[in-house]
Image (cartoon, rainbow, N blue to C red):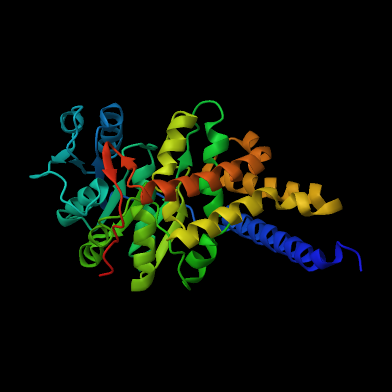
Amino acid sequence: MSKSEPNLPVTTALIVSVWLLYGWLLAVATGNRLFMRRPRGMASPCFEVCVPARNEAARIGPLVESLRAQGVGVTVFDDESEDGTGDLAEAAGATVVRPAETLPPGWTGKCRACHALAEGATADWTVFLDADTVPEPTFVARVSAYLAQRGSAKVVTGFPRMIPGLGVEPAYLGWVPWSLLASNPFWLVSSTGKGHNFFLNGQFSAWRTDALQELRPFEAARGAVLEDVTIGRYLARRGVRVDVLDVSSVLSVRMYDTLPEAWEGMSKNAGEVGGGVVGSLAFAGLLLLAGWGWAFGGRFGPALYGALCLTKLLTDGVVRTPRWTAPWMPLTCTAAAFTVLRSRWLKRQGQVVWKGRRYGGRQRPSSN
């Protein structure tokens, strides 16, 4: 018996795992690219927009002006900003809400802001937008048309176009939409009405206001830094389906300008995706397997590498990120794995910093 024979079962299992993983990624990415719902048609506004904002002076004015020009009401929660964000929002035509007290213990700033905005909402639908989003002139009309057509829906979210940052920032940040759009069959759940994606995108979400005020999702997720993932899981437990759209034609977002900003920004919450230490380790391991599994494919290695790049190109077609980033996928996945592990370590050390506030410890969201 040769010395290499005992390793054959392990090698075979690894190769089979790689084929299965790449097959799943390719199938899901293709389905989401071809069949994910998109807002079409035009309708009068049926919602109001709520924006949580902390130190967003450079962005809040143009965002509010764009929305007000489309005939929709805008309410901004000025989360103890120090740069005049609230005054600029008011000057642009928004109603501004300011907190009566400093951030209470056990809450993150965004959850406190969104909860307060939800409590005061009065329109049929409430749409939450992050301050770094950029709506197109047809955003309100097209989203209103979709909400009118989907009368049974209670929660709608979606993927905006990702405006690339400078240098290699798009190659690094590309793992975020790719890891979602190549692993989670959003189109299948939305089209069949079966199952749940356990997902919400905090950059854009639309809620039927009566359901929003009954479910109180931001209160349930009050201590979560990655509140949208927490809320997605909360909605799944409550049996509330979420429609997930491709909104890249009507909404854009520029999350970060440079690679260091993206590294620090994603390090604050990437570890939450796995749900715990074991989950984070598993997620990091899957990222490394996806990034480098093709190297174990022998003569099929180049084809497997091509399949990996194709999954990235397919997801790029949804969020419209630069296609030159696809060949970087092994390095992108490696950087993503280290980001997840660093994020988990920062949380355990109580060194998570977000919008100038430090979070840490073992805070857990309510399960109400």
Give the vertical position of 10 relative to 29 (above or below): below
Work out which quarter of the rendered image holds the N terminus and state it.
bottom right
Q: Is residue 62 above or below residue 276?
A: above
Residue under the point 52% across and 32% down: 169
Residue 274, position in %: x, y?
Answer: 47, 59
Locate residue 280, reporting x and y percent.
Answer: 49, 56
Q: To which quarter of the image does residue 199 belong? A: bottom left
Query: What residue is drawn where x is 66% and y is 43%?
Result: 330
| Nearer the observer, 261 or 250 | 261
Left or right: residue 155 versus residue 340 is: left
Q: Quadrant of residue 122?
A: bottom left
For the residue pair 264 and 251, the one nearer the viewer reads as 264
User: In this picture, is 366 found above or below 307?
Assistant: below
- Left or right, 273 with reference to 366: right
Q: Is residue 249 left or right of residue 32?
A: left
Confirm whether residue 124 shows in the render. yes
Question: Image point 35% across, 58% down: which residue?
Answer: 147
Q: Quadrant of the C terminus?
A: bottom left
To which quarter of the image does residue 234 belong?
Answer: bottom left
Is any atom of residue 251 visible in this view?
A: no
Residue in the picture at 59% in, 55% down: 285
- The residue positioned farthest toward the right in the image shown: 1
Residue 288 horizontal/vertical position (percent): 62, 50
The location of residue 214, given as percent across then percent down, is: 21, 67
Give the mark count.
Answer: 0
